[in-house]
Amino acid sequence: MIQIDDKLISFDVFEKHFCCDLPQCLGACCVHGLSGAPLEPEEIDILKKEIGIIEQFLKPGGIEAVRKQGVAIRDFDGDMVTPLIEGEECAFCIEENGIAMCAIEKAWLQGKVGFRKPISCHLYPIRVKKYSTFTAINYDQWSICQPARDLGLKNGILVYKFLKEAITRAYGKEFYHEMEVAAQMLEEQRADSQNESQQ
């Protein structure tokens, strides 16, 4: 793993390929899963304040789920997450042209709210786990994201590059720059290893 500040980052974030291919996966990550999207405490506060506006973009099942469960619930791991519609898709999930998307993000794109979407969604396929002394940043390989792995490999897009905007939003420009430096170091180490093996 690579350490930057108090973050421990999996090598996979620097070495695996990924690029969302929505026409192929149809936004499946918004629909499938055992629980909703993880939420930060400040995100829950924002959603509580903005839900009146966001509701205008939700489908009936989403409105019902939010009104019954609230904007956040505690899942089986004890984490605060978005509620689900009948235990399946995220309550904030809507469809456009057959592709699942986030109602919160749609409201943001239209300038109705200042909050784009939960950072956990923006960072996916990175998953973040906070511990007492450090934060683990890992690459989550989900079977439904195979089209994204294929497209990323085809176009040469690595996970950390695909997530530049999200990582910068979460941790700042300097942190992302440090990731770029680390990626270059890893690339040089790989090149040196290959040269040594060929000698």
Image: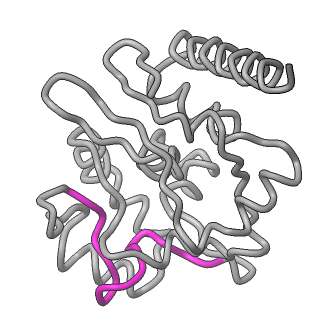
Horizontally, residue 91 falls left or right of residue 105, namely left
* Nearest the eye: 159 or 86: 159
**Image vertical order of residue 104 relative to residue 156, above or below:** below
Q: What main secondary structure does the magenta stretch of the protein show? A: loop
What is the x, y in percent for residue 176?
A: 57, 19
Horizontally, residue 24 falls left or right of residue 143, namely right
> Which residue lies at the image location 58% right of the left edge and 19% below the top edge?
179
Horizontally, residue 191 falls left or right of residue 75, namely right
* Nearest the eye: 98 or 17: 17
In this figure, which colouring scheme has been used for the structure? one colour
The quarter of the displayed image where residue 9 is located: top left
Quadrant of the frame with the C terminus? top right
What is the x, y in percent for residue 39?
A: 29, 50
> Which residue lies at the image location 18% right of the left edge and 79% below the top edge?
68
What is the x, y in percent for residue 123?
A: 51, 44
The quarter of the displayed image where residue 24 is located: bottom right
> Which residue lies at the image location 17% right of the left edge and 22% below the top edge?
133
Residue that protrudes farthest toward the front in the picture: 199
Is residue 82 on the magenta stretch?
yes
* Nearest the eye: 78 or 107: 78
The quarter of the displayed image where residue 151 is located: bottom right
Quadrant of the frame with the N terminus? top left
Q: How many marks?
A: 0
Is residue 165 on the magenta stretch?
no
Which residues are drawn in magenta? Answer: 80-95
> Which residue lies at the image location 78% right of the left edge and 62% below the top edge?
150
What is the x, y in percent for residue 82?
A: 30, 64
**Image vertical order of residue 40 relative to residue 91, above or below:** above
